[in-house]
Amino acid sequence: MNLETIARLSGVSRSTVSRVINNSPRVSEDTRRKVLDIIQQTNFQPNIAARSLASGCTRILGLVIPTAVSNLFVDPYFPLLIQGITAACNARDYSMMLWLADAEYERRMMRQILYSGLIDGVLLASMPENDPMLEALREARRPFVVQGRDPHHSDVAYVDVDNLESSRQATLHLARLRHRRIAHITGPLNTAVGKDRRRGYEQALQLSGLSYSPALVAEGDFSYEGGYQAMLRLLPHNPDAVFVASDTMARGAMRAVIENGLTIPEDIAMVGFDDMPFAAQMEPPLTTVRQPVLRMGSVAAETLIELIENPNAKPLGIRLPTELVIRASCGFSLRAGAAA
């Protein structure tokens, strides 16, 4: 099935069929309806490349995730994010193309992403600071949205949560429960999210009159193993609580605590970040900052589509609300009972 066949069945010219497919106003409603009826009856799918040449757009968004494939399928954060993006694409008649890249491959594929004509815009997820992809997109004047705040460019559209304030409240909660040696497992410190969550932790210590100790801070990488190894580095310094920058790392940290003969929350209280689906099923259930990952994906895609369809629109920075979800891992019931 091709344009010539659709034209013959519709009794119109090939160019008229092309105008209908590309939603040109230069077609009468009767002719448009006749052609669309034939397209529906024959289940005709226009060739994307040909449609792109004719209309100048593909209705495809590119999602770039700079992570190893193994991390993508182990960490439930990214499937939730992709689910939100896909839902928004489906609602607006767009599709999504996923690009997985480590730093070296990303440099090689940059021209393919930017100039192949395969995509109309790009979503960048969890990018490290000073990533060359972001600067290349700015220079190429391609529509793009970053999932996560970019601290270096005020003119970049992004969707995020207030990581600094959310982390400050999580750490303050531990301080209010009279924990005094509060440790922190950070996210990667080459990312804005990792730095913002650490700054929130530091500010909460200052507000609570607690001293900051470098020995009570260990860098992680948002992975289970990263959380496990970071907790092992913290244990010799005798923390009585730990704020962990992701739930996935908190799972690894819990394992390290238990393997060393300690209990949660009696010996070490714990607060995570994300409220992943498994957080409530952990033993003990994990106190954590709930961020709307699904919503973040859908808002990022909707924002990008607006930039594509309205080229003169001003890029926006959007921050979605979070909520501290209190469960047993922080020791709230134990401390509340002692206070009573």
Image (spheres, rainbow, N blue to C red):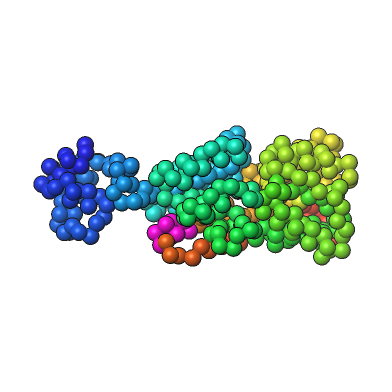
| Quadrant the C terminus occupies | bottom right
Classify 173 as above or below 184. below
210 in the magenta segment: no
Query: Which residue is painted at 51% across and 62% down in the image?
Result: 315
Position of 166 compared to 215: left or right?
left
Residue 18 drawn at (x, y percent): 22, 48
Observer able to see residue 326: no
Q: Residue 85: x percent and y percent?
A: 48, 50
Q: Residue at 41% across / 62% down in the picture?
A: 310
Choose top left, top right, bottom left or bottom right for residue 309: bottom left
**Residue drawn at the location 24% of the way across and 41% of the way down:** 44
Query: Does residue 133 sit above or below 335 in this rendering?
Result: above
Q: In the rendering, at what x and y percent does residue 21 appear? A: 25, 50
Q: Nearer the viewer, residue 78 or 111?
A: 111
Quadrant in which the N terminus is drawn = top left
> Image point 36% across, 50% down: which residue?
57
Can see residue 153?
yes
Q: Relative to the observer, which residue lies in front, 151 or 328?
A: 151
The number of numbered discs placed on residues in the rendered structure image is: 0
- Determine the main secondary structure of the stretch shown in magenta: helix
Q: Quadrant of residue 227?
A: top right
Residues shaded magenta: 302-310
- Relative placement, left or right, of 207 versus 129 is right
Looking at the image, the residue that sits furthest to the left is 11
